[in-house]
Image (cartoon, rainbow, N blue to C red):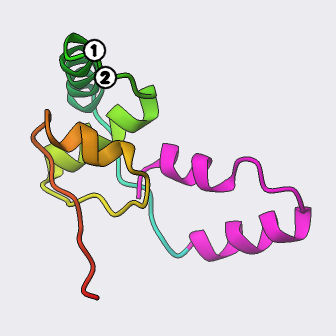
Amino acid sequence: MIGPIRQELLSGIPSQAQFDSLKEKLQAFEDLPLSQTDYERASDFYNTCRKSGIQGSQIDFLICAVGAGMGIPIFTSDKDFLIYAKHLPFSLHHPAR
């Protein structure tokens, strides 16, 4: 996991008890270190998508960049990533049904 994913998961939780519970569960996952290359790749991905008329958040493109750079498929239910995947060199995790 990367820190920005942890932040997104914990943001907007209405109850302090729910926040504390999820925070505790997420502590089982170490944060992967991010590098200058990850941020540069995220900016490149942002620019690539913008040229195709696709908008996304900076964190989404950072997630794509880390996935691409580390060769780790992205596990998400966010349909925006299906659109990004048509234009960017990362893969999505498809769980068995």
Is residue 97 within the magenta segment? no
- Examine the image and state in which quarter residue 50 appears: top left
Of the numbered discs in the image, which one, if any, rests on residue 24? Answer: none
Q: Position of residue 90 (x, y in %)?
A: 15, 47
- Examine the image and state in which quarter residue 86 appears: top left
User: Which three-letter amino acid code belongs to the residue tagged 1?
Assistant: Arg
- Screen quadrant of the C terminus: bottom left
The residue depicted at 27 percent of the width and 79 percent of the height is: 95
Horizontal side of 21 relative to 77 (left or right) equals: right
In the rendered image of this protein, does residue 69 appear above or below residue 93?
above
Contact flag, marks 1 and 2 (Cβ < 8 Å): yes
In the rendered image of this protein, does residue 91 appear above or below residue 97?
above
Q: Main secondary structure of the magenta part?
A: helix
Look at the image and give the residue range highlighted in magenta: 1-27
Which residue is situated farthest in the bottom direction here?
A: 97
Q: Position of residue 30 (x, y in %)?
A: 45, 64
Horizontal side of 47 relative to 5 (left or right) equals: left
Between 53 and 90, the one nearer to me in the picture = 53
User: Which three-letter amino acid code belongs to the residue tagged 2?
Assistant: Ile
How dense is the environment of label 2, judged by Cα within 10 Å: few (below 14), some, or many (20 and up)?
some
Is residue 23 within the magenta segment? yes
The residue depicted at 58 percent of the width and 70 percent of the height is: 27
Q: Secondary structure at mark 1?
A: helix
Identify the residue position indicated by label 1 in the image: 50
Horizontal side of 35 relative to 3 (left or right) equals: left
Identify the residue position indicated by label 2 in the image: 54
Q: Position of residue 60 (x, y in %)?
A: 40, 37
- Screen quadrant of the N terminus: bottom left
The count of marks equals: 2
In the rendered image of this protein, does residue 20 appear above or below residue 86?
below
